[in-house]
Amino acid sequence: MTERTPIGALVSHVEITSATVQRGDIIQVGGRACRVSNLFQLPQGAKQLLFESGELLTIHTRTRLVALRMLRRR
């Protein structure tokens, strides 16, 4: 992850679920920071996350993860 944080952006830790995950969220998986590039809705509320690296992660409705999310200042 060599991208820089845009000026005026704040980064915060947020708890995410399949209902609240967003594109751009950064999730640490296996010691690596992975940025969500796309989301796919699956049956029963699950979602499949596509990371910029091309890897996939499926999270279910009960899955709870901590992610970094950029919040823009207004």
Image (cartoon, rainbow, N blue to C red):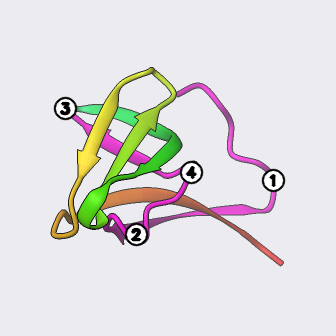
Q: Quadrant of the C terminus?
A: bottom right
Residue 10 located left or right of residue 37: right
Mark 3 lies on residue: 30
Do the residues under discs 4 and 2 have CB atoms within 8 angstroms?
no
Mark 2 lies on residue: 14
Three-letter amino acid code of the residue under disc 2: Val
Mark 1 lies on residue: 7
Q: Is residue 7 above or below residue 74?
A: above
Three-letter amino acid code of the residue under disc 3: Gly
Residue 42 screen position, x and y as percent: 33, 53
**Which residue sits at x=45%, y=33%?**
51
Mark 4 lies on residue: 23
Which segment is the magenta one?
1-30
- For the residues carrying marks 4 and 2, which lies nearer the camera in this image? 4
Q: Is residue 43 above or below residue 48?
A: below
**Which residue sits at x=68%, y=45%?**
5
Q: Residues within 10 Å of mark 2 (few under 14, many from 20)?
A: some
Q: CA distance from mark 2 to mark 3?
A: 18 Å
Q: Residues within 10 Å of mark 1 (few under 14, many from 20)?
A: few
Mark 2 vs 3, N-terminal side? 2
**Which residue sits at x=30%, y=42%?**
28
- For the residues carrying marks 2 and 1, which lies nearer the camera in this image? 2
